[in-house]
Image (cartoon, rainbow, N blue to C red):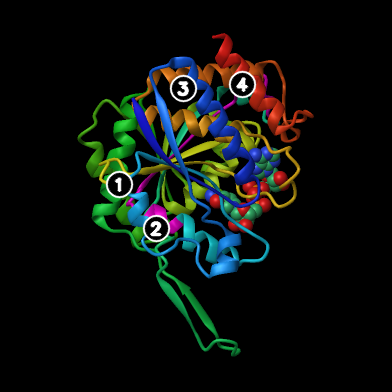
Amino acid sequence: RKHRIAVIPGDGIGLEVIEAGKKVLEELAEKSGEIQFDFKDFDWSSKRYLEQGHYIPEGGLDELKTFDAIYFGAVGSQEVPDHVSLWDLRLAICQGFDQYANVRPARVLPGVTSRLQGADKIDWVIVRENSEGEYSGNGGRVHQGLPDEIGTEVSIFSRKGVERIHRFAFELAMTRPRKKLLLVTKSNAQRHGMVLWDQIFFEVARDFPEVEIQRELVDAVTTRMVLKPETMDVIVATNLHADIISDLAAALSGSLGIAPTANLNPERTFPSMFEPIHGSAFDIAGQGIANPIGAFWTAVMMLEHLGEETSARRLMDAIEAVTRSELHARDLGGAATTAEITDAVCQHIDEQ
Ligand code: NAI
Ligand code: MG
């Protein structure tokens, strides 16, 4: 089976960890003998933006559409404002391809120590609404530069958009042993869109009587994550709220450098995009010390999406064998380089 993968390393350590990810995928393909990856690299980056004035060239999204999946690194540069790089590249793809379900698993891998007591009980999947809400891009500025200047950022919650993400989250909860789903919201302070968000959740819940539903306000959920991590399973939250709590989830499970994410178009009308949750990390870029585990776990999610369950399991086993051996990058208190971790994962794949 051959899979055509569009590769967008982006900026900074995105280039380093995606290169490493391609290496382990090639190793898996070689080992299995049954699968093949046809990678095509796209240099859509801040460098390109600074030289040519755009991240995505004309017709770029049309070309991307023909791939089975997109493997993405990170975008962000000190020379380009973050809201430009994010919107012109990452959000252009997520929104252009209606990748409305962003899925972020969090769990402490073997051999990884968390600063949180009881972190071994973390086993969460955060489902983030990825197409509208607070990141709809709806708003503007008036009286620019004047004392009475105003900026607005208006969230949009559509019945269609909210219903499909809740349904996705319930379906996901059904596949998990504990079958719990936590609704995260802020409907006490925000009384329109957030109330709609809650209301549709309870409507959809009627179709899933086996799922145990829970609810929490977004501020309270941060304390629950720290104090009672074992009480949570699947969590569904809006674009902004889930963005924040998933960074917390990553930190609680060890480091931002190991957390993966999938931007899914569940209907498969368009390709889905897989990326580590971290950014381009200016402080360590170019030094060969970025932790590639996030990019590898991301590749596991991509393999699952491509229906390659056996290879996905093999790669996850190899990742866990390496973390268990405590060969860690600096973010986890070790001294291993990106290349050393990559080689160790390849070796485990080879020896399986
Ligand atoms: P960041 O994730 O790039 O870095 C935060 C901290 O975590 C840094 O100290 C970094 O060294 C460390 N870190 C992150 N990934 C690591 C890894 N794999 N191994 C070891 N250490 C790692 O977030 P920051 O600094 O807020 O943003 C830097 C740039 O990245 C900005 O331009 C931002 O907009 C962009 N960004 C892009 C994202 C994306 O493309 N999806 C996501 C987050 C940020
Ligand atoms: Mg984030």
Question: Counting other residues with Cα less than 10 Å from the Cα at mark 3, is it few (<14), some (14-19), or many (20 or more)?
Answer: some
SS category of the residue bearing label 2:
helix
Q: Of the two numbered discs 1 and 4 on the same chain, state the one appearing first in sequence.
A: 1
SS category of the residue bearing label 3:
helix
Residue assigned mark 2: 60
Q: Nearer the viewer, mark 3 or mark 1?
A: 3
Mark 3 → mark 1, Cα distance in angstroms = 24 Å
Q: Of the two numbered discs 3 and 4 on the same chain, state the one appearing first in sequence.
A: 3
Question: Counting other residues with Cα less than 10 Å from the Cα at mark 1, is it few (<14), some (14-19), or many (20 or more)?
Answer: some
Residue assigned mark 4: 345
Determine the residue positioned at 40% across, 52% down.
94
Q: Nearer the viewer, mark 2 or mark 4?
A: 2
Do callouts 2 and 4 mark residues in contact (Cβ within 8 Å)? no
Mark 3 → mark 4, Cα distance in angstroms = 14 Å
Q: Of the two numbered discs 3 and 2 on the same chain, state the one appearing first in sequence.
A: 3
Determine the residue positioned at 58% across, 9% down.
351
Residue assigned mark 3: 29
Numbered range of the magenta stretch: 91-114
Of 246 and 257, the residue lying toward us:
257
